[in-house]
RNA sequence: GCCCGGGUGAUGAAAUUGGUAGACAUAGCGGACUUAAAAUCCGCAGCCUUAUGGCGUACGGGUUCGAUUCCCGUCCUGGGCACCA
């Protein structure tokens, strides 16, 4: 055996061994329980960062652990290959997006292999390959025919200078990131997927996902946002016609307090009113300024303008003025809201600002007390719904529920509405006016309308040799792409040039891993094998808690309802979900003359910190001049704050990188990146190597297999088996790898103190080292593969069963309890392990520490927690 | 603005169901080995105080025999907000 730990050598050797034996290949086997371990596939941005290393190491640890537990493990990997960065790179480097993407994939695949992940590369897929996206085009056409895909107008960010649609990320402080022009909202036709048709099931399904974090389920629940309320109309007359203005409210009990109605700037009523009101038209125009991101809309100043149109209160008949409000969202409900300044904070502020009427309170809380607006107590009371109506005509005196029932019934009788369940969830707009995405398989024909591309013409292949300029949609400039014949009438037609949202590709890739080679169907019976009961473990960043995970749940249901899973009932794709905390790092930037930010990687920056270690100034190493510190954020390409693991791997090896990132913190916690401590991880592996080397050099012996031991060795062996139990529990149940590593470190510290060379001690050392190497194998597989081959020549670590704790070794005669007086630590006592509560209490009262503390007093109460402590209350 | 998290020594963290706060590491200090350095090994280490003891898990309050853990409020901080992925 080599005396020195040589990570590079042993890692390459282990990797080529695994490659040769096909250790990571997954083959369907009905006789074995399966374990499908899925990690979120990366966008091939060019390089990995520490967040990826963390994500994929967690997945690899679980995959290897379950394999040792006897499961048939599938751990696949692929590439979320469509997306905006490829187009940006194309503009910058004058390289076609496809070429850039494939080059990145090739490099990143090598990086993954260098980290030693047990991935089944035979199942690799890239979403930009026609063999992949043809199937989502195929399903799209089915959904279109079923009405689950439909076309309507939607709002986008429009850059008037570049004449192009911008993503929210490309709008910075209301301006286009490239042109610097003020961004406007623009209505364009888009295709939508009817996710709202599944809102109820997506919500109810959350309760059947015990393997998901509560936090994620709660976020999805709030996102879907089911609310029960009343949808009703304000009747009015316009241009000689009777019309209705519809609104939705969860507070119909306050309907008698309505003093105005607010509509969105895009509302038809606003447009009608603006026709003969230039001031209003200008205001609506002003509302078009700025982007569509909700965070911006929700934080901007609330503004409004009257339309001059009046509607009738549906119950009182009172005249109510309609206002246009910039805070009313056209995409939610009917794009109009009733306003009750007496009871809604936002309505109150709006009414104050514009001098609108505010009626007296129409509600009071149980007990009769009416409260002033805008106090904390008032807000709490309003939210509680434990209220009854006052000054509300015939509804006065009714509680919240009775009032809503009565009002809804009266509205229904008038034909002006009734109860309605409303969801916050909106249909999913999937059209993108971009090039590097999956073409939407629709043909527009003047006589036949929108015609789905027939199966035999699929896939609609995205041309790969194009020039990207950043202005307009490249496909719309390629007649060779869009000129086509109508599949129905054969007349000349125009192919859709929008592509799909890249979330579509990532909504079903995990199913395609089961059968990536099938060129006749989207999925096949292998899905039933690998996905039965759901994918056993999904690992990925918490930032995907809502969108990706909700869309994937939705698509799985769409595929189920298209009958694609045969007899298999697959309602939910992911049985167990581990949401990894973000690895965050500081961001640095410089602004150019036009105010555009240029992000600088942390590795190029020299930091000066205050005495608390917080950064106070930063300089660019290249020129020594200051850069601006932009705060901590998740590692990303757009903020250029990713830390490339390559330097770490080159210097210390993959095992050290894996050990370090797993030891740094529990997986669900977010982690501020720092490489302080990498040295310690490397030191531990060197120490492990040396300990095994010393043992092996003294000669191998059979592992201890039971029998009598002297007290010291017996205590050590108990620690060994406690550690085995703990590590298995940390991997399998708690998914907390840092404490598993700490427990093994403690065990090795105790091992080093053994100082006993008797025959039983040597057998115990053999038993310990074999167990330690197998316990660490999932985290640091290369070094453990090498060490195990020394401890058990001819055996491969990965093929072994995970060690089992020996119950006999765990048995204890005596245990130590803590003695507390009034909840404060005052001493300890030893009692037989079998002692009952009464015996423990007697022993506690009799012990020296208790006698000293009590000084003759009798405790008022004695609390005994078996196995833990005794608390004397005096 | 709205939804969901987090805050414990100089640092990363541990405390698994309300039961010994700071395990295991990093950085630091001291010692051993060495001509020396590196490597390695051993020891010290929350704060205050004097042995006793007191204080201490962002801050303020509450529940409990007992709170890092549960409840209320405040501050700071991370993620998401539908076209970053």
Image (cartoon, coloured by chain):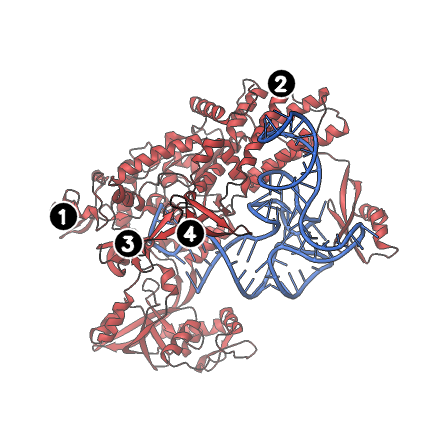
Chain colours: A red, B blue
Q: Is disc 4 in the same subunit as disc 3?
A: yes
User: Circle 1 — which element?
Assistant: strand
User: Circle 2 — which element?
Assistant: helix
Tell me the subunit letter for badge 1: A
Pinpoint residue B30: horizontal percent, then vertical percent.
Answer: 68, 38
Q: Which residue is under mark 2?
A: A697
Q: Is disc 3 in the same subunit as disc 1?
A: yes
Pinpoint residue A823: horizontal percent, then vertical percent.
Answer: 74, 54
Tell me the subunit letter for badge 4: A
User: Circle 4 — which element?
Assistant: loop
Between discs 4 and 1, the one toward the N terminus: 1
Q: Is disc 3 in the same subunit as disc 2?
A: yes
Nearer to us: label 3 or label 1 = 3
User: Circle 3 — which element?
Assistant: strand
Question: Which of the numbered marks, if any, corresponds to residue A546?
Answer: 4
Tell me the subunit letter for badge 2: A
Query: In the image, is residue B34 above or below residue A385?
Result: above
Cβ–Cβ under 8 Å for marks 2 and 4 = no
């Amino acid at each position: 055996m080599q005396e020195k730990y040589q990570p590079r050598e042993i890692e390459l050797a282990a990797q080529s061994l695994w490659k040769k034996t096909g250790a990571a290949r997954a083959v369907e086997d009905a006789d074995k329980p399966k374990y499908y371990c899925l990690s979120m596939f990366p966008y091939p941005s060019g390089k990995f960062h520490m967040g990826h290393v963390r994500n994929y190491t967690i997945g690899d640890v679980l995959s290897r652990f379950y394999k040792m537990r006897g499961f048939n493990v599938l751990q696949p990997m692929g590439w979320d290959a469509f997306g905006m960065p490829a187009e940006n790179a194309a503009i910058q480097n004058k390289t076609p997006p496809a070429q850039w993407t494939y080059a990145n994939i090739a490099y990143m695949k090598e990086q993954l292999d260098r980290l030693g992940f047990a991935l089944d590369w035979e199942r690799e897929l890239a979403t930009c390959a026609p063999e992949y996206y043809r199937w989502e085009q195929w399903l799209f056409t089915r959904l279109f025919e079923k009405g689950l895909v439909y076309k309507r107008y939607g709002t986008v960010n429009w850059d008037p200078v570049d004449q192009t649609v911008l993503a929210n990320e490309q709008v910075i402080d209301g301006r286009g990131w490239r042109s610097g022009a003020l961004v406007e909202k623009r209505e364009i036709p888009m295709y939508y997927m009817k996710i709202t048709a599944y809102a109820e099931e997506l919500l109810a399904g959350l309760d059947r996902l015990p393997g998901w974090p509560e936090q994620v389920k709660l976020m999805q629940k709030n996102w879907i946002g089911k609310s029960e309320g009343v949808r009703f109309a304000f009747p009015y007359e316009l241009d000689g016609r009777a019309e209705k203005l519809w609104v939705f409210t969860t507070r119909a009990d306050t309907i008698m307090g309505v003093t105005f109605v607010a509509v969105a700037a895009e509302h038809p009523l606003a447009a009608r009113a603006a026709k003969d009101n230039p001031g209003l038209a200008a205001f609506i125009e002003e509302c078009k300024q700025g982007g569509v991101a909700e965070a911006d809309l929700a934080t901007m100043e609330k503004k409004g303008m009257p339309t001059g149109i009046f509607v009738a209160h549906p119950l009182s008949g009172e005249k109510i003025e309609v206002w246009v409000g910039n805070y009313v969202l056209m995409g939610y409900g009917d794009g109009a809201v009733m306003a009750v300044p007496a009871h809604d904070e936002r309505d109150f502020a709006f009414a104050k600002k514009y001098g609108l009427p505010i009626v007296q309170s129409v509600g009071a809380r149980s007990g009769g007390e009416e409260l002033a607006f805008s106090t904390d107590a008032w807000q709490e009371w309003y939210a509680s719904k434990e209220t009854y109506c006052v000054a509300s005509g015939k509804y006065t005196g009714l509680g919240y529920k009775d009032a809503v029932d009565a009002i809804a019934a009266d509205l229904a009788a008038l034909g002006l509405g009734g109860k309605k369940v409303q969801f916050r969830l909106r249909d999913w707009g999937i059209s993108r006016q971009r090039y590097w995405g999956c073409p939407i398989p629709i043909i527009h024909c003047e006589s036949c309308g929108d015609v789905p591309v027939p199966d035999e013409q699929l896939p609609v292949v995205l041309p790969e040799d194009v020039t990207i300029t950043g202005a307009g949609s490249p496909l719309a400039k390629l007649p060779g792409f869009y000129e086509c014949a109508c599949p129905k009438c054969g007349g000349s037609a125009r192919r859709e040039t929008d592509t799909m949202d890249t979330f579509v590709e990532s909504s079903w890739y995990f199913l395609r891993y089961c059968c990536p080679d099938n060129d006749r169907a989207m999925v096949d019976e292998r899905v039933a094998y690998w996905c039965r009961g759901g994918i056993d473990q999904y690992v990925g960043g918490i930032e995907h808690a809502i969108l990706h995970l909700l869309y994937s749940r939705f698509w799985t249901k769409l595929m189920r309802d298209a009958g694609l899973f045969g007899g298999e009932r697959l309602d939910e794709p992911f049985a167990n979900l581990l949401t990894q905390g973000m690895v965050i790092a500081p961001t640095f930037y410089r602004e150019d003359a036009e105010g555009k930010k240029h992000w600088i990687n942390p590795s190029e920056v020299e930091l000066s910190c205050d005495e608390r270690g917080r950064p106070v100034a930063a300089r660019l190493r290249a020129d020594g001049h200051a850069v601006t510190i932009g705060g901590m954020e998740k590692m990303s390409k757009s903020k250029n704050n990713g830390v490339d693991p390559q330097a770490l791997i080159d210097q210390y090896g993959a095992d050290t990188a894996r050990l370090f990132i797993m030891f740094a913190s529990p997986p669900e916690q977010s982690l501020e990146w720092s490489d302080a401590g990498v040295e310690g991880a490397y030191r531990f592996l060197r120490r492990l190597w040396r300990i095994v080397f010393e043992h092996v050099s003294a000669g191998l012996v059979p592992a201890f297999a039971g029998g009598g031991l002297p007290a010291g060795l017996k205590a050590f062996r108990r620690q060994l088996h406690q550690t085995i139990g703990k590590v298995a529990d940390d991997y399998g149940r708690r998914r907390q790898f840092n404490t598993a590593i700490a427990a093994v470190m403690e065990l090795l510290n105790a091992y080093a103190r053994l100082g006993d060379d008797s025959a039983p001690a040597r057998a115990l050392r053999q038993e310990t080292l074999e167990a330690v190497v197998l316990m660490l194998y999932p985290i640091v597989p290369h070094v453990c593969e090498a060490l195990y081959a020394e401890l058990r020549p001819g055996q491969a670590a990965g093929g072994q069963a995970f060690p089992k704790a020996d119950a006999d070794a765990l048995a204890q005669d005596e245990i130590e309890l803590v003695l507390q007086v009034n909840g404060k630590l005052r001493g300890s006592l030893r009692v037989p392990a079998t002692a009952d509560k009464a015996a423990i209490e007697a022993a506690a009262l009799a012990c020296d520490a208790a006698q000293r503390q009590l000084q003759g007093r009798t405790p008022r109460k004695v609390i005994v927690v078996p196995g833990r402590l005794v608390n004397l209350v005096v």
